[in-house]
Image (cartoon, grey):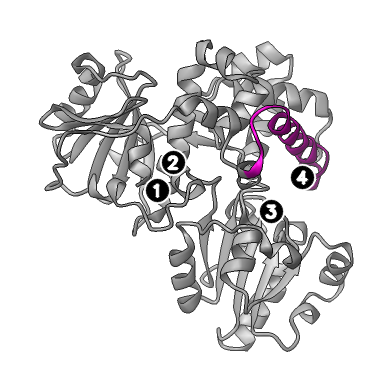
Amino acid sequence: MNKNHSNRELIYKPRWMGPSIRAAIKTFPVVVISGARQVGKSTFLQNEFPDFKYISLDDYSILQQAKSDPSSLWIGADQIILDEAQRVPEILSAVKLSVDKTQRKMRFLISGSSNLLLMKSISESLAGRAVYFEMLPMSYGEMYGKTQTPQNFFNLLNPRYEPKEQDLSTINPLPLVLKGFMPPLMNLTPGNDILLWWEGYIKTYLERDLRELSQVESLIDFRRVLESLAIRTGNLLNQTEISRDTGVSQPTVYRYIKLLEVSNLAKRLPAYHSSRTKRITKSSKVFFIDPGLSAYLSGYHDEEVLGKAREWGNFFETMIFLHLKILSELLIPKASIYYWRTTTAKEVDFIIEQGRKLVAFEVKSSKEPTFSDIKNLLTFIEENPHTIRGVFLYAGRSIKWLHSKVLAVPWWWITR
């Protein structure tokens, strides 16, 4: 799924965020879409907005023109796509001038492989003019043709929703986690093709994207940190431990993790506290945005070994994090995601908060749900009685009530 118009004959899978972005560009002069390399931003923009003039700053000639005289790129056009905008951050000043000059009649769709919201110069240039979206890897539902926005997840936020118990299909998460959810992987068969694709992805990131973002003294040290963090996906972020295991200084580890966040490859998950003033980021968990990337970097290259791995539960949880993140972005207003942990080490994997609504999720790769699996969910509900419900996501096939406030569902059900 590359950026050339000639490749539009490739099968395009619509993205769930499409309606939100189409609605936003009608109201706001600038819509910014950030996301990791290869999540499908260019393909999405070219297919969903064919009437916009498409300008890729990956093209060297256009890049030079953008640095010299950026507004000349869109002379005579009033609907413009600027792809890979992080390569010329100064172009945003020209966008601002064009928007203001035409009294906000021009429309710009701006995409970037970096989190443009974290790049101070960009967020300042577009203050009051832009809305921001993040494109993530594809969900299971999107990959396999679910074009309509999934209702099951939205229904969980409705206190009156009570689905009937029933048996559904079993969908094995192992090959999906191993493969990952980047759009180009859809057409690759499991095995060497996928391994080669991930190695090429990492090589491109290390040798090109990273150098554009920041000066990295040692790519070997950076990869060491990358691999050390990958095997810890879903765990509390402990920079001291990573520094000790890799031999890289703590300040450098901190900076490298920040670079992974700016390039949208890793996310911090903050702790939930019922008092908003007590929510602190120092106890964050860290998740890779694609479980396939974290599994690959951790050295797991086949299903049999991955299924027996001590870290298998964390990779499964990383897949669920990706899906909850995608679904939370679709809500209006968008929902926030946290994890919850007590001083006595009771923990709930994910808390979805939308306004004053709360839904708690416990995740396990087991195939049968049991009452003992939901004890921490019940503790959270007891301490936060306004919680709509607890949800137990697992690798089995049944919708089952484990408690009047806790519903067990197959992991993939939330994407339907």
> Going 61% across and 65% down the picture, which residue do you hit?
45
Query: Of discs 1 and 4, which sits in the foreground?
Result: 1
Region of the chain picked out in magenta, as a range: 187-213
* Mark 1 and mark 3: Cα distance apart in space: 23 Å
Picture quadrant of residue 199: top right
Marks 1,4: beta carbons within 8 A:
no
Residue 27's x, y, as percent?
46, 77
- Three-letter code for the amino acid on which mark 4 is drawn: Asp
Residue linked to disc 4: 209
* Mark 1 and mark 4: Cα distance apart in space: 28 Å
Residue linked to disc 3: 1
Looking at the image, residue 225 lies above or below residue 125? above
**Which mark is drawn over residue 323?**
2
Query: Of discs 4 and 3, which sits in the foreground?
Result: 3
* Mark 3 and mark 2: Cα distance apart in space: 21 Å
- Please report whichever mark, 1 or 4, sits nearer to the chain's N-terminal start: 4
- Three-letter code for the amino acid on which mark 2 is drawn: His
Q: Is residue 125 visible?
A: no
* Mark 1 and mark 2: Cα distance apart in space: 6 Å
Looking at the image, residue 398 lies above or below residue 62? above
Regarding mark 1 in the picture, which secondary structure is present there?
Answer: helix
